[in-house]
Image: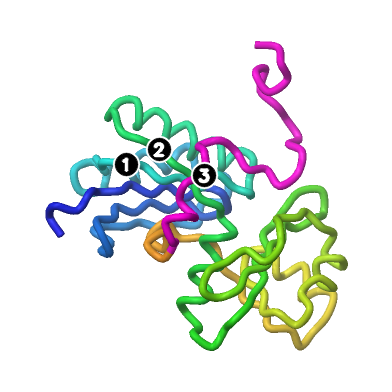
Amino acid sequence: MADAPRILVLETATAACSVALLAGDTVLAQAHEIVGRGHAERLIPMIGALPGGGRADAILVDVGPGSFTGVRVGLAAARGLAIGWGVPVHGYSSLALLAAAGFASDPDLHRLSVVLEGGHGEVFVQHFSAPLMETAPLASLRPDVALAALDGRAAIGSGVRHLAALAGGLDLREALPRAADALLLPPAFTTLPPRPLYGRGPDAKTLAERGLA
């Protein structure tokens, strides 16, 4: 295990701020806090508290969907550390991470939907089957439309409370992504480019995104 490449995982796409240092199939160290909007203040100290200051051979970062600001905080940190350390950085989806954790925690689940807080009264929704496979594309939906789209699936994520308010008797499991659960992701789910996956049009754009830089 000492020879396994170390991977630093950064998770800032939701109200959680989470970091983990992985090597092979082992979590060497991790930290997970519910910070709301405090990612910018907490992320770097959490990384610094990891063994070796979190120094790794590669960086894996949540690219969304989720909080516009949170995703950007994680990406900025990942890119900066990657340049400083001279290591590659790749992305993963918050939805896939929650799906992987959901299947791992309940072997009886064969399909589920991940529902995350979105914007403008909507939720981010994606359907998965076990072993981890996307069975529908990511969508940003009104809660009533998301509820109808479940089609009997269990639902996991930070957005399930919006569905619970519309109907009872559903298999709804509140959860936030944890960086250490990246260990559960198949390699194919850890190769996204390190740029935001919004799930819907962002409320704000950088000058570059608006074609002005």
Q: In terms of sequence position, does the residue under pointer 3 or pointer 1 come before the other? A: 1
Q: Can residue 76 be found in the magenta stretch?
A: no
Which residue position holds label 2? 89
Kindly report the distance in space between the C-alpha atoms of the residues bearing marks 2 and 3. 9 Å
Question: CB under 8 Å between callouts 2 and 3?
Answer: no
> In the structure shown, which secondary structural element does the residue marked by tag 2 occupy?
strand
Q: Nearer the viewer, residue 41 or 185?
A: 185
CB atoms of marks 2 and 1 within 8 Å = yes
Which numbered disc, 2 or 1, marks the residue that appears first in the sequence?
1
In the rendered structure, which amino acid carries the disc numbered 2?
A: Val
Amino acid bearing label 3: Leu
Q: State which tag comes first along the sequence, 2 or 3.
A: 2
Magenta region, mostly helix, strand or loop?
Answer: loop
Q: Residue at (64%, 75%) from the top-left corner?
A: 112
Q: Residue at x 55, y 75 (%)?
A: 130
Residue placed farthest to the left in the image? 2
Start-end of magenta stretch: 185-213
Residue that extends furthest to the top in the rendered view of this protein: 213
Label 2 vs label 1: CA separation? Answer: 6 Å
Picture coordinates of residue 5 (x, y %)? 23, 49
Mark 1: secondary structure:
strand
Q: Which residue is mark 3?
A: 192
- Around disc 2, counting alpha carbons within 10 Å, would you say few (fewer than 14), some (14 to 19), or many (20 or more)? many
The three-letter code of the residue at mark 1 reads Ala
Query: Residue 202 colored magenta?
Result: yes
Q: Which image quarter holds the N terminus? A: bottom left
Asked if residue 40 is positioned above or below residue 33 in the image, the reply reads above
In the rendered image, residue 3, in percent from the top left (x then y), is placed at 13, 52
**Quarter of the rendering containing residue 88:** top left
User: What residue does disc 1 label?
Assistant: 58
For the point 44% across and 41% down, which residue is it?
90
Residue 64 pos. (x, y %): 59, 47
